[in-house]
Image (cartoon, rainbow, N blue to C red):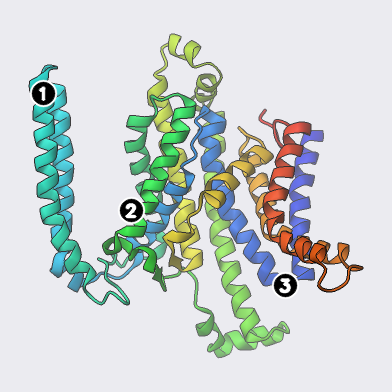
Amino acid sequence: MTETVKNTALFLGVAALVVITGFMQSWNSAILIVNMGLISAIMAIGVNLQWGFAGLFNVGVMGFVALGGLAVVLVSEPLSPEAWSAGGWGIVLALLLGAATVFAAVMATKRMPKGRNRALTVLVVLIAGFVIYRAVFDPNVMAVEAINPAAAGNIGGLGLPVLLAWPAGGLLAAGAAWLIGKTALGLRSDYLAIATLGIAEIIIAVMKNEDWLARGVKNVIGLPRPVPYEIDLQNDPGFVESAASLGLDPVTASTLYVKLGYSVLFTVVLLVLLWMAQMALKSPWGRMMRAIRDNEVAAEAMGKDVTRRHLQVFVLGSAVCGIAGAMMTTLDGQLTPGTYQPLRFTFLIWVMVIVGGSGNNFGAVLGAMLIWFLWVQVEPLGLWLMNVITFGLPEGSALKSHLIDSAAHMRLLTMGVILLLVLRFSPRGLIPEK
């Protein structure tokens, strides 16, 4: 009972911080923090599945989040008939030829006996396949990217409702995780971390440079939304009248309405995923995963296929991160590959999991909400603190300028201090694994 009270008090404490933000700053800011906190909580659950359940050290979170964002473009953007007629089908053919080349090389490796002939055959297949692939791929890409490059230059999407892009983001991330896991999960934990980080950087590099796919660094803006546009609400007489009855102007009321709509959708997704993660944790599968995490050798001696189970949980955790990535891109209304930085999408999520409690799904949610709140609020609070500290110093003082300019680094300092304090006084996190 005491543990339940403590955990409830922790969640209520985070909620109180959000409410104070609403009163002291604005409710728009407070709800935006909640929305990003909910998305971060879903990412933290995905990482917790991999690390807390199975001990897999995945530092490629950013790549799977980015694939979720890419899914929003490929699913919800309207189709571009001009691009498809100019070179879209040629790009598809080239990709199929590339996949066929890899498949042929793998089959040659499996079916031919070891030796010089096999090595030469595989080399010839790969070189010939690459040449054919580039001969088909390059001209079709140039044709697609030449179509209205200032506003489009990509193949577009399927034109489906944007909510369908969220599970599609999970499937896309899961497919990539399966391919990565088949090759990387046999590595030691430190090598796995290096491999996943490198693969995440490759995914981001592809998204930045392949304009035909999602405009690269030109970004895709104006993505469809599952909630109304603020301008439409402001032009609705019924909404304006309802806002006036609550003492709100139409602009403020419309922004609050939209953000609350996202909050409801994100909360539903979080609760569903949290329930599924809890059921998995309490199931025989969850107990087996923790047994593998604690002692792989003993689990393997008991007849468990460790590599296969690692692949399962790696795919599941990556799929959850992909769903979160699709939700975040939907909230932003744009896909900006240049913003996918490891600091935000890998380091910060790991801090959330460690601070909240590795191996505990509720701990991951608490850590996500708390750390995201601090990540947003520490910098302005740090600037206020520096102004208070330097109040008595004369204007133009080098020390005063230095301290005020240093407020921008308060985020990193705070994350480091929190991480050290938690590891020192509560090494298992705020809500430890049972």
The quadrant holding residue 152 is bottom left
Q: Nearer the viewer, residue 251 or 119?
A: 119
Which amino acid type is shown beneath numbered disc 1? Arg
Mark 2 vs mark 3: give the one in front.
Answer: 2
The residue labelled by disc 2 is 206
Which amino acid type is shown beneath numbered disc 2? Val
Q: Could you give the CA–CA distance between mark 2 and mark 1, rounded to whole angstroms?
A: 31 Å
The reply to whether residue 42 is in sight is yes
Q: Is residue 38 above or below residue 193?
A: below
Neighbour tally class for label 1: few under 14, some 14-19, many 20 plus, Cα within 10 Å: some
The residue labelled by disc 1 is 118
The residue labelled by disc 3 is 26
Q: Position of residue 175 (x, y in %)?
A: 33, 42
Label pair 2/3, CB-CB below 8 angstroms: no
Which amino acid type is shown beneath numbered disc 3? Ser
Q: Position of residue 398 (x, y in %)?
A: 79, 65
The reply to whether residue 167 is in sight is no
Choose the circle earlier in sequence order: 1 or 3: 3
Check disc 1 and report its element: helix, strand or loop.
helix
Q: Could you give the CA–CA distance between mark 1 and mark 3, rounded to whole angstroms?
A: 67 Å
Q: Residue at x 59, y 41 (%)?
A: 350
Check disc 3 and report its element: helix, strand or loop.
loop
Q: Quadrant of the N terminus?
A: top right
